[in-house]
Image (cartoon, rainbow, N blue to C red):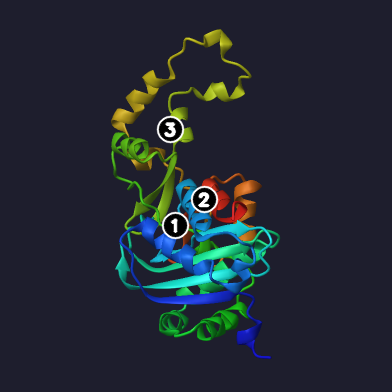
Amino acid sequence: MNTVVQYPASITILPDLTASGCDELLKRLSEVAVKDAHAAKCGVPAEKIFELIKAREEQSSTAVGGGLMLPHIRLAGLEQLVVVFGRFAEPFAGCETPDEIPLDIACLLLVPEENPVEGLRFMADLGGCIRTPAKRTRLFAAQDADELREVLAEQRTQTHTLVAADIMIPARVFATPGMQLKEATRLMAESHQEIIPVLDGKKLVGELSSVELFKLGIPDFFSQLKSVGFIRYFDPFEKYFAVEAASRVEDVMNRELPSFHPDATLIEVVFAISVLKQPVIYVTNHKQELQGVISQAQLLGRIINL
């Protein structure tokens, strides 16, 4: 038995995919998915699949950047991972993406409720293929499911887990060292970001967080207090506004923050977030250029809520 047959997923390819909008795209993928023999055994109609997928997208978008979208849900009683691999005829801008790059691939996953790890393994395999130019070319050239399974099976021999590059998204908001602090805080407020990276060109040089900004108005000795009840009328923002008016980002940013290589494993990312209490993971290359970020909420949405 060859590796093509052994790859544990039932795959359908949709070449030259088109859609008028994101809802139509998800409906089209759902309609194809329920025709799969494994999915058909679950007895869930296409309308219900679409409803579940749409609700999942509204909770947290599965567009991961780089032209890829991975809508997915779990199905009880599903015996094998079901994949609908859609390739667009032209770059598709009908769905919002974290890096504003139109979609090239929309890949719907129906994941066995009892074995969600298979969904994670497929994401790792697909991510590895997309990051490898030769395999990416083969993904786009595959004419049938067997050809696609062959590429994925080859990748599985090299992929053991999701890595940081599979989970990260581009940083849509960032500050620069010389930016006025007032301008940086305005960006944070408008984008609803509690933490943003500080970039010098493409290089990650620091981090600006709301927690550290709040501390600007608090005297150092407050860290020794158990309560501030006896001075509850103290106005911490009087000092803050004075500092803000005269400061640039480089004056207050955190310069000592660990970064991770794109090949950092899932357990390394989880350890940093859960044990080391790092709210945001920064993924950089060997030049310390920022490649993407991973937040607690993003990890929850992509992995725990698979």
- Residue occupying the point 45% across, 65% down: 29
Q: Is residue 94 above or below residue 91?
A: above
- Given residues 48 and 258, the one toward you in this image is 48
> Which amino acid, mark 3?
Leu
Query: Which label sits in the foreground, 3 or 1?
Result: 1
Q: Are marks 1 and 2 in contact (CB under 8 Å)?
A: yes
x and y percentages locating residue 292 in the rendered image: 44, 58
Q: Residues within 10 Å of mark 2 (few under 14, many from 20)?
A: some
Choose the circle earlier in sequence order: 1 or 2.
1
x and y percentages locating residue 224 in the rendered image: 61, 23
> Which amino acid, mark 2?
Gln
Q: Residues within 10 Å of mark 1 (few under 14, many from 20)?
A: many
Asked if residue 197 lies left or right of residue 305, the reply is left
- What is the spatial separation of the Cα atoms under label 2 and label 3, in whole angstroms? 23 Å
Q: Is residue 274 shown to the viewer in this render? A: yes
Residue 169: assigned label: 1
Q: Check disc 2 and report the residue beneath it.
A: 298
- What is the spatial separation of the Cα atoms under label 3 and label 1, in whole angstroms? 25 Å
- Residue occupying the point 61% across, 78% down: 156
Q: Check disc 3 and report the residue beneath it.
A: 213
> Which amino acid, mark 1?
Ile
